[in-house]
Amino acid sequence: MNKYVSIALLLFGSFAVAQNSKFEKDYTAIEGKVIEWRRDIHQNPELSNREFKTAEKIAKHLKSLGIAVQTGVAHTGVVGVLKGGQDGKVVALRADIDALPVMERNDLPFKSNVTSEFLGEKVGVMHACGHDTHTAILMGVAEVLSKNKDKIKGTVKFIFQPAEEGPPPGEEGGALLMVKEGVLKNPDVDAIFGLHINSQTPVGVIRYKSGGTMAAAQSFTINVKGKQSHGSQPWSGVDPILISAKIIDGLQTIISRETNLTNEAAVITVGKIKSGVRFNIIPESAEMIGTIRTLDYDMKDHINKRMEEMVPTIAQAYGGDATIEIRDATDITYNDPALVEQMLPTMKRTAGDANIQTQKAITGAEDFSYFQREVPGFFFFLGGMTPGNTESFPHHTPDFLIDDSGLLLGVKTLTEMSLDYLNQ
């Protein structure tokens, strides 16, 4: 690093520290509100593309702050635009707002008892991935920045995105639809930041990875056709359940025997299989749905090709037929290396050097990746586990828990990143 860059970073660091001290009262004042919003949203979750009340709550809050608001973006999304006291760049901040079809299983006073319908079945609805915290954090950031808009050199765009978990079958939604509808335009966004709470990372810790950080996700549907017969006479039919089992076994060999996992991780998971109505009837058909996760585009292409070859071939070997449809759900979440480097001093200042940790890429997926395809982006992980806990529950499970004390760091980090990016 040459002396001029060092001097510039030193001066910027001094400015940023001074800037940080000006907002401490705002941060202290907002923490209780953020927790209250989070708990209310948690108790009243809504599934993808059905986040009507959540969107209404967000829009009402942004309007109360004097922020220009657009509703109905990608069905139920909300976008707020805050113009600063001076002209400059445009930075976007994104939070996802949808919940999951999971029945909550804990004793929280703000536990969700909401039920709904998903894929034709009655289900519980729960914020089992922390999107309630993301929404509350960004509402807090909006309030702090709106009170200090004279200090903003440029514009901040708040993107509250529906359907991150994927839109219902037959519907468009999520980040892809938001991009399609022009959410990164008018005003044109120069960079975008986002975070994800993590139940297995201690409160106060921020983890990140430069470059590829989360997997591309695809969903697939396999339909198997056999021949129905009496359960006591399997030789007179073709069993689609048996064929499905062989297909599942075969798909796993693509990962275990054909994929070089020393390069990048890859996963094929069958998440649901549906077939039959009675114990003594071999059914006529079976349906399987699942997900594919890849961190390398060549590996993704190979796995897709082999699945499309293998599924019908295995079915034919057992006297049946099968088709497979593979659909893209997200791209690889790619953190722009230059943007990461630019923002690291801010993150270290808000969380402390020792609490900023790098991590390896993970096979989880995020449709934040679709924003990153259009503009440089940085997506990081915020600790939500009570420090000292010996047990934590994974995301997408009924026992998932987040410690509210971790939310304020999210507010501080997104606020400071926004200001530092715009003021550099």
Image: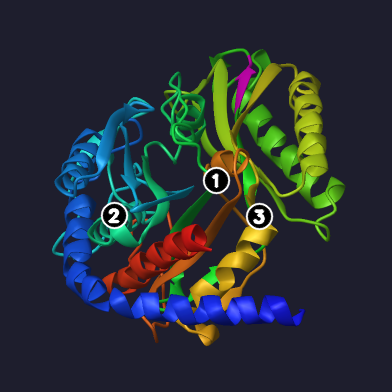
**Closer to the observer: label 1 or label 2?**
1
- The one nearer the camera, 143 or 55, is 143
* Residue topped by disc 1: 190
* Residue topped by disc 3: 336
Gap in angstroms between the C-alphas marked 3 and 1:
12 Å
Q: Which residue is drawn at 26% across and 55% down?
A: 146
* Residue 257 at x, y percent in the picture: 85, 49
Query: Height in image: 179 above or below 5?
Result: above
Gap in angstroms between the C-alphas marked 3 and 2:
24 Å
Task: State yes or no: discs 3 and 1 in contact (Cβ < 8 Å).
Answer: no
Gap in angstroms between the C-alphas marked 1 and 2:
18 Å
Task: Give the SS element for disc 3.
Answer: loop
- The one nearer the camera, 223 or 171, is 171
Q: Earlier in the sequence, mark 3 or mark 2?
A: 2
* Residue 159 at x, y percent in the picture: 38, 43
Query: Residue 234, located in which quarter of the rendered image?
Result: top right
Q: What stretch is highlighted in magenta?
A: 221-226
Looking at the rendered structure, the kind of residue marked 2 is Ala
Looking at the rendered structure, the kind of residue marked 1 is Asp
Query: Residue 248, located in which quarter of the rendered image?
Result: top right
